[in-house]
Image (cartoon, rainbow, N blue to C red):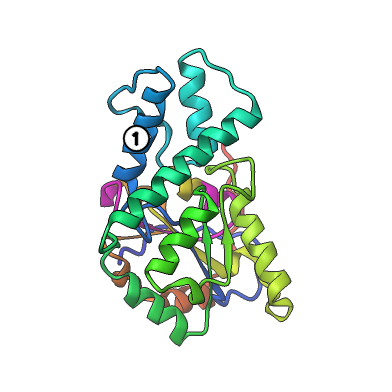
Amino acid sequence: MDSGSWVLGQQYNMTLKAVLFDFNGVIINDEPIHEQLIEQLLIEENLRPIPGEFQEVCLGRSDRVCLTELLKRRGRVVSEAYLLQLMQRKAQAYQQQIERIAKLPTYSGLEDLIFQTRSQQLKLAVVSGAMRSEIELVLNRLNLTQYFSILVAGNDITTSKPEPDGYLLAVERLNQLYPELQLQPEQCIAIEDTPAGIQAAKAAKIPVVGVANTYPFHMMQRQANWAVDYLNQLDLEWVQQVLAKAIPQPTVTEC
């Protein structure tokens, strides 16, 4: 695991208490499915998909933001009701695709990492721009539902990564569910696979691990606090030690 960079805000009890997982590209390898479904939706709307546009506009972002931007680029402005209808059509098509797959494509090391979190009694949450129905379907299929006490989905917020709202809401909901936790953002780590997700976690003051599932390792290394090729390379005991020794650093301002 690359030690990466470490920048701290003000924090006095740097004990790791929670791990916040992105969903698409971290738990399930389904980005090709989403790209196909978005392209299909555009065609149904008599609009032409453009190669490479999904990666540019949609990776790491919610369906709401993705579809809004794709339609805007084609001169289409739709009502909130119609946008929700498009999102629902895409979610239904996603569920149909997932139900046809006998063995869902997950990432190497996922179960090992979840075992680590359970052995250290850490709280788990999913923070994603995906629709709640999609997340719940996949977690149920993978028999992982019981491990994630909080799900923050695209239905819950109108903004999208790289905005921090989803991560901040996850911390708030964990505190509501476990008041004794007194959880601060700096006491979490986020697991992300895209620049937008990394920016969102950092904006929420949450240290972030970049996993090279979607983008190259060197890109994750440059942007995240730590970088790994595979989830099972993340050593949570080591992270705990780093957090315990962390000393708040003064803010550096640019001239």
x, y percent for residue 54: 36, 32
Q: Is residue 14 visible?
A: yes
Q: Nearer the viewer, residue 224 or 168?
A: 168
State the extent of the magenta-drawn residues as a range.
200-218
Q: Nearer the viewer, residue 5 or 34?
A: 34
Figure quadrant of residue 92: top left
In the rendered view, would you say 37 is above or below 229?
above
Figure quadrant of residue 158: top right
In the rendered view, would you say 45 is above or below 121?
above
Q: Is residue 255 visible?
A: no
Say which quadrant the C terminus sits in: top right
Crowding near pointer 1: few (<14 within 10 Å), some, many (20+)?
Answer: few
In the rendered view, would you say 83 is above or below 18?
above
Residue indicated by mark 1? 55
| Count of all numbered marks drawn on residues in the image | 1
> At x 25% / y 62%, what residue is drawn?
102
> At x 70% / y 70%, what residue is drawn?
175
x, y percent for residue 32: 29, 43
Q: Nearer the viewer, residue 234 or 60?
A: 60
Query: Outermost residue, bottom direction?
Result: 119
Q: Tell me the SS state at disc 1.
A: helix
x, y percent for residue 206: 55, 59
In the rendered view, would you say 141 is above or below 55?
below
x, y percent for residue 199: 50, 46
Query: Outermost residue, top direction?
Result: 75
Say which quadrant the N terminus sits in: bottom left
Magenta run includes residue 178:
no
Magenta run includes residue 203:
yes
The amino acid at mark 1 is Gln
Relative horizontal placement of residue 213, taking residue 9 as reference (left or right): left
Relative horizontal placement of residue 191, taking residue 48 as reference (left or right): right
